[in-house]
Amino acid sequence: MSTQTHWLCPVCVALLLTGCGVPHTRTIHVSGEVAYEPLLIGAWETTIEDSQKLTFDVSKWSHDDNSYRFVVNAEHGKKPLCEGRAYLSRIEDRQYLTVGSADSEQQVPRYNTIVVDELQPKLQVRILNRQWLLRTIKADPTVIKHQGFPNGDFLITATTEELKAFYQKHLKEDAPWEKFILSRKK
């Protein structure tokens, strides 16, 4: 395993799936790029801090569309850490999983995009490194459209095409990404 691979932590999971990690207001895909992949369905897990297990339960959202329901649970938790609706898309030679918050109270939709590098035998994914993106935006605020907030937080407001171009531009670089590996639950 690469030394750059990081294991998920509860805070990271909660941020990722609620749209607070590197949130954006639009999906990376258009409707024609959405795909359904049965291999994604099931329970995935990882161990953090050498002992706590996190489980990602992925199921089909409904019978009439190609979306998934994501629920993240801690090993001994009574309530899910977070849950959301996700769409898998195929754009050129890559797969992306766009996860939206299940929080209907949000005034602006928030999504996070996960690059899916491998589905078997383990789920290998990566997300944009928040600190890298903050440094990049600080160095060049025009690199991607965003809205900044007084607390230092930000929301990417780029169009779908701009978001897609930004991701594709940085796919072959190492610095922008946090890598995660999950195994099928036994």
Image (tube, helix red, strand yellow):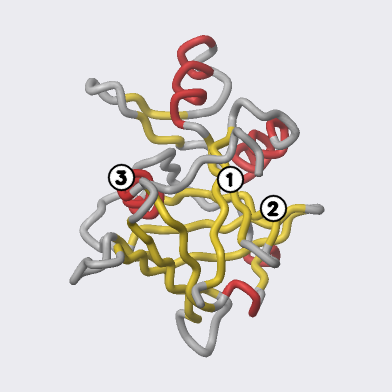
Three-letter amino acid code of the residue under disc 1: Arg
Q: Is residue 140 above or below residue 65?
A: above
Pointer 2 or 1: first along the chain: 2
Which residue is located at x 50 percent, y 28 percent? Answer: 145
Q: Is residue 10 above or below residue 63?
A: above
Which residue is located at x 75 percent, y 33 percent? Answer: 172
Pointer 1: residues within 10 angstroms few (<14), some, or many (20+)?
Answer: many
- The residues tagged by marks 3 and 1 sit, at their Cα atoms, a distance apart of 16 Å
Image spot of residue 51 (x, y percent): 35, 54
Q: Quadrant of residue 116?
A: bottom right
Three-letter amino acid code of the residue under disc 3: Val
Mark 3 lies on residue: 11
Nearest the viewer among 87 and 38 is 38
Q: Which mark is residue 117?
A: 2
The image shows a total of numbered marks equal to: 3
Mark 1 lies on residue: 126
